[in-house]
């Protein structure tokens, strides 16, 4: 029998929260919206109501129902979390006016989940419903913590476990319940000091309790009616026969408003009339026919499988263990208990260690080993995808593993054999969605291989453009080095004359660009490194091509500088008056124009401003090579190639006409173009958007890149002919 919720001056919510139709008289450790409503009604007229909550979660729809009851209550609602408020329970408490947590309690928020059955369309609809629900719940958490909904959703996706202090710091709770030691953050009173090892044990215990609750709810819903089904789908009980050997079947129903279980007669079944004398028990035992026995056995087996399936997928239960439970003929309740024991036995203990001085401190539970394993798996997967040798020996234990075996190693699960596609897929799906290191391992590997391929591809624009780093995405001021004033002699009085830097500094900004990629589920499950390598190679190739296209698009647009004049313009003295072909005469005119360029003060000639690059399109490629070729033994002075060895040709397909350009080396102060990347993130990166679904692993390929003109004194253009 569920315990009354109103106990003394408090409403006590302990255990899992279930929808009303799933709570029956024999249940313990559960509560439902109707039970909370009755308890709140009993407190009508009070100015303040306190709820004591210790719940691992349950049904989110039922939790939302209770949350709204609390938020709409006329009284001031205070929730005191004593133990845990996880999953749906954390949603429930958000409706309170004030949330307090005991020092050793925890709160957990995460994305909702569901066990779905059906075809692809059914699963897609289920995914849509889950996404809508998650967004709604994120808005509720965000409103409470006063943070953006996106930030709240990120915490949900990461399945965030918070101590009492962390929950207060993040805005999900208001105070830590007073104790004997230090003060709470909001000054509500002293807070007991909780040792870190005890807090670690509390979180680990809550995590185990939450896992056990999920298993228990699976068992409950496997034998309980679905809310969307008609009432006659409820579980039935068979009573002892009456003297006329008629059988009365009653459908088990939820408690009525008074808290008394109601028996609903099954249609068409005679019910004893009121006042009928009691009938003695018959001596013959009721026999069940064979068809009914077979049906009951099938229901029992399905219920056990339904409860065990998510834990089999996660690797917590083996197929042979579950089959043994079915073969033994144990009830669903007994099976659930034994499954809980099996899962709990597999959970790592949090051991305590002592320092050399004897002081107790929490042992770092596998943190270093976990980091080493994560890095080793990432190195091994990188090496397998790229075909290169691993970086160091940390990868050695994992080099022979397939992807699904790596997924199992990351979660601590037992890897299935390669023969079963479904079991391999389940292991990968569980690893991608269980909060394990595997998504990070996969992302690390993909990004490392992507960076290797990206660095191998050259760009032509680097021949004329100098690279810079952007600190952020704001506009960056680029001061022209050639505009710095020259040094002047210090006179006898020690006076230093100051020059000025011109006001024509240029502005450059970084842009963010992205596209979608996907690795098919078949490639992941089948360990198809060739297919994965192909996706990454293509990604590594399109980014340099994009940079190339974007830079030359900017270049050919002849952008304006801060003075309002295009880079190549007669006013800048770097544009030929008439277009001519490449010749000694035209090249000499261009070189002379650059040699005579003056600094911003209009007085100083820029030193060593000779061109080093002849930039052409395919139309002038051959002619450029002829004029820059080395004459082995010229027979007369006219045959000497004046520019041989002084200019290097750069050919760009984006230049479609016969125009040609002279550029100083980009290392010179008078360089004309700059390009750049976000500091510390030169290479493109991949971000996993959908860890593992019907279409496999969907990723976003992201890249930050900027380019633009910053000067005109280091380049010369001839329109050509």
Image (cartoon, grey):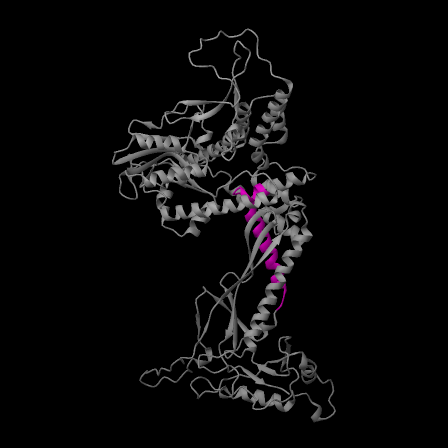
Q: Residue at x 33, y 30 (%)?
A: 39
Q: Based on the displayed image, in which of its 4 quarters is residue 454 positioned?
A: bottom right
Q: Nearer the viewer, residue 407 or 199?
A: 407
- Quarter placement of the C terminus: bottom right
Q: Nearer the viewer, residue 483 or 320?
A: 320
Q: Position of 51 compared to 682: left or right?
A: left
Q: Position of 282 compared to 6: left or right?
A: right
* Residue 180 picture location, percent across and down: 28, 34
Compared with residue 415, is residue 494 higher up or lower down, i.e. above or below?
Answer: below
Compared with residue 118, is residue 518 higher up or lower down, i.e. above or below?
Answer: below
* Residue 226 picture location, percent across and down: 51, 33
Compared with residue 287, is residue 518 higher up or lower down, i.e. above or below?
Answer: below
Compared with residue 383, is residue 69 higher up or lower down, i.e. above or below?
Answer: above
**Secondary structure of the magenta portion, mostly?**
helix
- Quarter placement of the N terminus: top left
Q: Nearer the viewer, residue 612 or 315?
A: 315
Q: Residue at x 52, y 28 (%)?
A: 232
Number of marks in the rendered image: 0
Q: Based on the displayed image, in which of its 4 quarters is residue 421 positioned?
A: top right
* Residue 196 picture location, percent across and down: 40, 38
Q: Nearer the viewer, residue 429 or 143?
A: 143
**Residue 364 visible to an observer of this rendering:** yes
Q: Give the range drawn in magenta.
A: 429-458
* Residue 466 picture location, percent across and down: 53, 73
**Residue 356 visible to an observer of this rendering:** no
**Residue 436 is one of the magenta-drawn residues:** yes
**Residue 5 is one of the magenta-drawn residues:** no
């Amino acid at each position: 029998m569920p315990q009354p919720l109103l106990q003394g001056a408090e409403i006590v919510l302990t255990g899992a929260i279930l929808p009303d139709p799933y709570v029956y008289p024999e249940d313990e450790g559960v509560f439902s919206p109707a039970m909370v409503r009755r308890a709140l009604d009993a407190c009508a007229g009070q100015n303040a109501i306190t709820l004591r909550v210790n719940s691992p979660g349950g049904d989110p729809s039922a939790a939302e129902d209770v949350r709204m009851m609390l938020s709409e209550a006329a009284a001031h609602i205070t929730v005191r979390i004593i133990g845990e408020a996880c999953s749906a329970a954390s949603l429930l408490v958000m409706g309170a006016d004030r949330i307090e947590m005991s020092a050793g309690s925890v709160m957990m928020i995460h994305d909702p989940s569901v066990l779905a059955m059906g075809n692809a369309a059914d699963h897609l609809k289920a995914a849509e419903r889950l996404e809508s629900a998650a967004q709604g719940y994120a808005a509720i958490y965000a409103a409470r913590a006063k943070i953006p909904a996106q930030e709240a959703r990120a915490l949900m996706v990461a399945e965030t476990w918070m101590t009492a202090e962390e929950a207060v710091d993040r805005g999900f709770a208001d105070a830590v319940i007073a104790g004997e030691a230090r003060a709470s953050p909001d000054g509500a009173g002293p807070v007991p000091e909780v040792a870190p090892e005890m807090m670690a044990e509390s979180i680990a215990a809550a995590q185990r309790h939450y896992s056990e609750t999920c298993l228990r709810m699976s068992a409950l819903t496997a034998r309980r009616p679905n809310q969307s089904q008609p009432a006659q789908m409820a579980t039935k009980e068979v009573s002892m026969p009456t003297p006329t050997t008629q059988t009365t079947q009653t459908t088990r129903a939820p408690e009525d408003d008074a808290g008394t279980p109601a028996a609903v007669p099954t249609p068409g079944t005679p019910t004893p009339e009121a006042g009928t004398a009691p009938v003695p028990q018959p001596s013959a035992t009721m026999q069940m026919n064979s068809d009914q026995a077979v049906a009951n056995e099938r229901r029992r087996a399905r219920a056990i499988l339904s409860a065990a399936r998510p834990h089999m997928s996660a690797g917590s239960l083996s197929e042979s263990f579950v089959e043994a439970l079915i073969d033994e003929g144990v009830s669903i309740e007994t099976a659930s208990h034994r499954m809980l024991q099996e899962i709990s036995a597999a959970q790592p203990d949090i051991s305590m260690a002592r320092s050399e001085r004897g002081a107790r401190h929490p042992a770092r539970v596998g943190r270093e080993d976990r980091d080493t394993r994560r890095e080793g798996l990432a190195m091994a997967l990188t090496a397998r995808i790229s075909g290169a040798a691993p970086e160091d020996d940390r990868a050695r234990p994992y080099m022979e593993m397939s992807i699904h075996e790596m997924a199992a190693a990351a979660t601590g699960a037992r890897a299935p054999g390669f023969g079963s596609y479904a079991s391999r897929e389940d292991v990968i799906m569980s690893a991608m969605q269980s909060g394990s290191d595997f998504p990070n391992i996969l992302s690390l590997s993909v990004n490392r291989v992507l960076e290797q391929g990206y660095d191998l591809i050259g760009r032509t624009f680097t021949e004329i453009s100098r690279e810079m780093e952007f600190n952020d995405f704001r506009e960056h001021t680029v001061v022209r080095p050639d505009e710095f004033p020259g040094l002047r002699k210090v006179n006898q009085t020690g006076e230093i004359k100051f020059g000025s830097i011109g006001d024509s500094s240029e502005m450059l900004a970084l842009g963010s660009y992205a596209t979608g990629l996907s690795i098919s589920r078949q490639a992941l499950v089948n360990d198809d490194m060739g297919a994965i390598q192909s996706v990454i190679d293509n990604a590594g190739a399109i980014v340099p091509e994009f940079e190339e296209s974007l830079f030359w698009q900017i270049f050919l647009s002849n952008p304006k500088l801060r003075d309002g004049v295009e880079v190549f313009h007669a006013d800048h003295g770097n544009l030929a008056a008439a277009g001519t072909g490449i010749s000694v005469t035209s090249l000499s005119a261009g070189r002379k124009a650059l040699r005579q360029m003056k600094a911003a003060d209009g007085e100083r000639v820029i030193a060593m401003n000779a061109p080093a690059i002849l930039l052409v399109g395919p139309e002038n490629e051959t002619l450029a090579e002829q004029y820059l070729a080395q004459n082995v033994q010229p027979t007369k002075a006219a045959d000497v190639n004046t520019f041989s060895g002084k200019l290097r040709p750069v050919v760009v397909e984006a230049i479609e006409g016969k125009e040609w350009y002279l550029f100083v080396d980009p290392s010179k102060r008078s360089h004309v173009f700059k390009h750049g990347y976000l500091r510390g993130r030169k290479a493109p990166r991949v971000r996993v958007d959908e860890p593992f679904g019907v279409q496999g692993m969907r990723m976003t390929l992201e890249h930050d890149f900027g380019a633009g003109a910053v000067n005109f004194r280091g380049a010369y253009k001839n329109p050509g002919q």
